[in-house]
């Protein structure tokens, strides 16, 4: 039998979710059986799968040791590089300026050097993240950006901040995201709203933009403002505000109107990109504006705060005429 005292980072979640995080080796069917048979109790009483854990609760588990995860003496994230571009940090969150080329999370080809492993190493070395004292929580990213796109990524340093951020992200009006991009061609209008429907091909990891709805397609809206035009090179510098957040939305939407992003080999034209010598797309999530309401709880202090990456490489080169 093992007992776990619920701390702040474990509180507020269902009992079954707590168990799944802390005991990934325990089959789900067996977990439900153990709860039903009172081999898993909360405060020495019978509990339900949906019981919400509170700070100070004690979860007793009368389960074989083989199902418990053994504590690691060395953590994988300690092998990650230390470099982090921190735009903002407080006791609850971090805003990171992720550069193009860096993965947000591990994949089947890269496990060690990712944004989240760098964050874990940073917080571990600061003494703010102590994995041996956590039952189920690890620092986590609230949003993610494609490997070949740069920009601001939000990380939560505790469970309550993560829950609040995830809830606020679902209310798109509570967090405004602005991107910078350079697209081929001269945008005629100074500003506008692009609308359409996005259909994703999971196998090819690509999307199509449609003018009319169809089965499986999701509505998209992309607001833009032209910041500059280079008539000699036939390029436009554009600020984009995402009104909806879909896979590859900006890249595919601009390509669909004849203005693919510079350096985008998936939705753009390689011949045009080759003339400029760019293999990485000119797209950057450069600004966040928090419009939190009272539901933001401990993060309400972020209301009306604006965070911006001041030096975006392609914007600088566009304005200097060196792009």
Image (cartoon, rainbow, N blue to C red):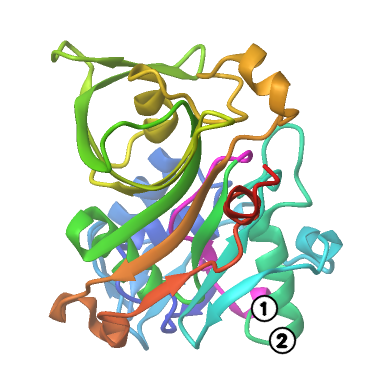
Q: Disc 1 and disc 2: Cα gap in Å? A: 5 Å
Q: Position of residue 196 (x, y in %)?
A: 20, 24
Quarter occupied by the C terminus: top right
| Residue position for label 1 | 123
Disc number for residue 62: none
In terms of depth relative to the viewer, which is nearer, 199 or 262?
A: 262
Q: Which residue is mark 2?
A: 126
Secondary structure that dominates the magenta span: loop
Residue 70 visible somewhere in the drawing? no
* Foreground of the two, 96 or 307: 307
- 9 left or right of 1? left
Locate residue 306 relative to residue 74 in the image: left or right: left
Determine if the magenta segment contains residue 135: yes
Magenta span includes 130? no
Q: Position of residue 154 (x, y in %)?
A: 48, 65
- For the residue carrying disc 1, how many other residues have a C-alpha within 10 Å: few (<14), some (14-19), or many (20+)? some
User: Which residues fall within the magenta stretch?
Assistant: 131-148
């Amino acid at each position: 039998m093992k007992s776990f005292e619920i701390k702040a980072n474990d509180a507020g979640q269902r009992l079954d979710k707590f168990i799944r995080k802390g005991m990934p080796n325990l089959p789900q069917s067996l977990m439900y059986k153990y709860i039903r048979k009172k081999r898993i109790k909360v405060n020495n009483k019978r509990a339900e799968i949906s019981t919400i854990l509170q700070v100070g609760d004690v979860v007793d588990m009368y389960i074989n040791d083989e199902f418990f995860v053994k504590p690691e003496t060395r953590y994988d994230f300690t092998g990650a590089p230390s470099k982090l571009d921190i735009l903002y940090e407080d006791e609850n969150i971090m805003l990171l300026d992720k550069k193009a080329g860096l993965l947000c999370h591990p994949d089947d080809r890269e496990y060690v050097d990712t944004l989240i492993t760098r964050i874990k190493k940073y917080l571990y070395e600061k003494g703010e993240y102590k994995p041996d004292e956590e039952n189920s929580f690890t620092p986590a990213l609230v949003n993610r950006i494609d490997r070949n796109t740069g920009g601001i990524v939000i990380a939560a340093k505790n469970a309550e901040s993560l829950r609040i951020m995830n809830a606020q992200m679902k209310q798109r009006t509570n967090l405004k995201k602005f991107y910078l991009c350079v697209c081929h061609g001269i945008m005629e209008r100074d500003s506008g709203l692009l609308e359409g429907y996005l259909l994703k091909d999971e196998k090819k990891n690509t999307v199509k933009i449609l003018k009319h709805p169809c089965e499986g397609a999701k509505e998209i809206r992309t607001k833009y403002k032209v910041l500059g035009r280079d008539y000699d090179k036939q390029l436009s510098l554009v600020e984009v505000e995402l009104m909806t957040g879909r896979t590859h939305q900006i890249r595919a939407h601009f390509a669909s109107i004849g203005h693919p992003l510079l350096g985008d080999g998936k939705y753009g034209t390689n011949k045009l990109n080759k003339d400029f010598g760019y293999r990485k797309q000119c797209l950057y999530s450069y600004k966040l504006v928090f419009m939190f309401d009272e539901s933001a709880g401990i993060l309400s202090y972020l209301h009306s705060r604006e965070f911006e990456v001041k030096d975006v490489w392609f914007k600088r080169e566009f304005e200097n005429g060196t792009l």
